[in-house]
């Protein structure tokens, strides 16, 4: 991977739904669709220290399917794939199969 997150940051790849959304016979363009909140963890940062001086431990691992906050993070495009770099606190849950 060419991107290595720093400190308590996490690199995730959004999971897109392949189905086209049609409501009331109207096709919704990609630009108007809501961004997915499900993502797969691609890389973890190096960790860090929180405000109280405690070491930050990741509760997730590479490959986990997670739910992310809707508007958090920074969008990054590399090799025609869309990724997002988030703080670990922007990951809300791990999705279990």
Image (cartoon, rainbow, N blue to C red):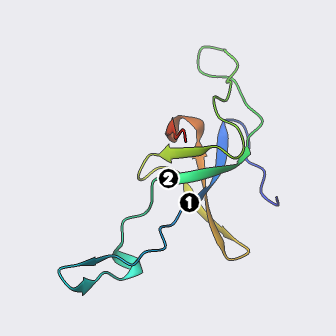
Residue for point 65% across, 42% down: 9
Quarter residue 25 falls in:
bottom left
Specify whether 69 is left or right of 3. Answer: left
Task: Give the number of marks.
Answer: 2
Label 2: which residue?
Answer: 38
Specify whether 3 is left or right of 36. Answer: right
Label 1: which residue?
Answer: 14
Q: Position of residue 36 (x, y in %)?
A: 45, 60
Quarter residue 82 falls in:
bottom right
Residue for point 50% across, 40% down: 90
Up/down of 54 relative to 45, above or below: above
Dot 2: few (<14), some (14–19), or many (≥20) neighbours within 10 Å? many
Who is closer to the viewer here, 58 or 52?
58
Residue for point 56% across, 53% down: 39
Up/down of 29 relative to 35, above or below: below
Q: Position of residue 72 (x, y in %)?
A: 47, 49
Q: Position of residue 43 (x, y in %)?
A: 73, 48
* Position of the N terminus by quadrant: bottom right
Q: Position of residue 66 (x, y in %)?
A: 54, 44
- Residue at the extreme right of the image, as rendered: 2
Label disc, if present, on residue 88 of the rendered structure: none
Who is closer to the viewer here, 97 or 78?
97
Quarter residue 19 falls in:
bottom left
Q: Are marks 1 and 2 in contact (CB under 8 Å)?
A: yes
Label 2, secondary structure: give it: strand
Residue for point 70% across, 37% down: 61
Who is closer to the viewer here, 19 or 46?
19
């Amino acid at each position: 991977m060419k991107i290595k997150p720093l400190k308590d940051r996490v690199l995730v790849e959004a999971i897109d739904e392949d189905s086209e959304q049609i409501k009331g016979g109207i096709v919704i363009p990609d630009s108007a669709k809501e961004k997915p909140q499900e993502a797969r963890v691609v890389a973890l940062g190096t960790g860090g220290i929180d405000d109280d001086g405690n070491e930050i431990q990741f509760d997730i691992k590479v490959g986990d399917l997670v739910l992310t906050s809707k508007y958090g993070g920074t969008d990054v495009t590399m090799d025609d794939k869309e990724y997002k770099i988030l703080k670990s606190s922007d990951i809300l849950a791990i999705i279990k199969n």
